[in-house]
Amino acid sequence: MTGEIFVFVDEEELFNLMKDLDCLYCRNPVTASKHHLKKRHLRFAIYYKDSGIGKFSIPCYCADGGHGRSHWHCPMCTKILQRTKDYKIHITNHGVEMTDKSTVELQPTTVLLETLQTDNEDRTAGNKSACQKCGIHFTTTSNLRRHERLQHGHDQQPMLCIDAKNAIYVTPKDLHGPRVPIHIRKSFALQILLCELEECWDFMKAQAQRGNPGKECRHLVRTNHARHYVPPPPLCVNSLEEMTDKHLLSKSEKQECQEMNSRACLEGVDCVYPIFWEEHELSERCIYFSVYTDLKDKWCQFGRTRVSFDTKSGNWKCLCEHKRNHCVHKYLSMWWLFQERPELLQNALDINTESVDVLEEVVLDAEDVVQMSPGGDDLC
């Protein structure tokens, strides 16, 4: 194969030479597209410097090599070499300096990379839609929220241990909307994996039938980052007496609260455990309580029920309210709130009219009530 060029200064010289032609360096006819030249020839090019000028040679597949094998044509003599190593030694003997890539080829590539890096840094600096967990950037806020929900949704949801003895936790039911807590139980020592939701029961049952009995629902998985048990302030007798004196509770309701709290103390669990999501940077208008019931029913599967208090409307709700309009679980939660956070009772509109008249006085005197019983008058 004579009269062909085997040495080039840059890739554009090769592309211009082979434009609209069949490849001159292949035995079989094939269009000399850029894709073909890069994949078949430039991929194996040998770079060197000749008289200070960066150049490169490409392998050839013409009939001169025999059986269509790749070979090298020396640009300085007529010799053909089969092996790349032998070709490098041969052209070195002609006085050239071997390099990884020619200077001509390296310069535009380096400039391009630096330009792309600078542009990327500029876009990153001006892009506010960045995930705080993994640092990935997004063009829109909606894409960022979708990523956070799908990739880090479990990490964003708090998980609190409220009963270390029975391995009971609370966590929000859903990823979005009101952070309504549900109870779950998880203990490897007791071999317990339970969730209050029926849909989670069905999910884990289906997984067990498929040969995966240890598969956990999305709520149980969150226990991997659960906050350890922190006991809440205990309920004190003096605060309950004050509520009765202010007509917030009747004597029968007071007696019922005392009996329920005593049973919880005998069992070694907290009668009322407050759940404040705002401590986890989740702003909520509702305050939730996990309240001891001494029962096990559909609405209190683990012996505890959920009570909610709307700080704006002042409404109280309990899971058992379909049975009774007023329940001891609400009174127990109100007892704890009156004792520890009386300012949140300002909008308690669901108490009786007589209580509303004295509510302002109750809030002002609540701190004095706590000071009268500095931790020594709790029922436990």
Image (cartoon, rainbow, N blue to C red):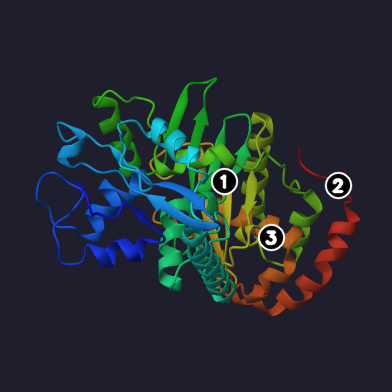
- Where's residue 363, x and y in %? 77, 71
- Where's residue 106, x and y in %? 51, 58
- Which amino acid lies under the numbered mark 2 shown in the image of this protein? Gly
> Left or right: where does residue 144 sit relative to residue 272?
left
Q: Are marks 1 and 2 in contact (CB under 8 Å)?
A: no
Foreground mark, 1 or 2?
A: 1
Residue underneath mark 1: 159
**Which mark is on residue 337?**
3
Residue underneath mark 2: 375
Q: Secondary structure at mark 1?
A: loop
Residue sitting nearer the eye, 290 or 192:
192
Q: Residue at x 86, y 47 (%)?
A: 375
Residue sitting nearer the eye, 247 or 176:
176
- Which amino acid lies under the numbered mark 1 shown in the image of this protein? Met
- Where's residue 284, x and y in %? 57, 67
Q: Quadrant of the C terminus?
A: top right
> Left or right: where does residue 344 sit relative to residue 69?
right
Q: Secondary structure at mark 3?
A: helix
- Where's residue 89, x and y in %? 46, 34
Q: Residue at x 37, y 31 (%)?
A: 215
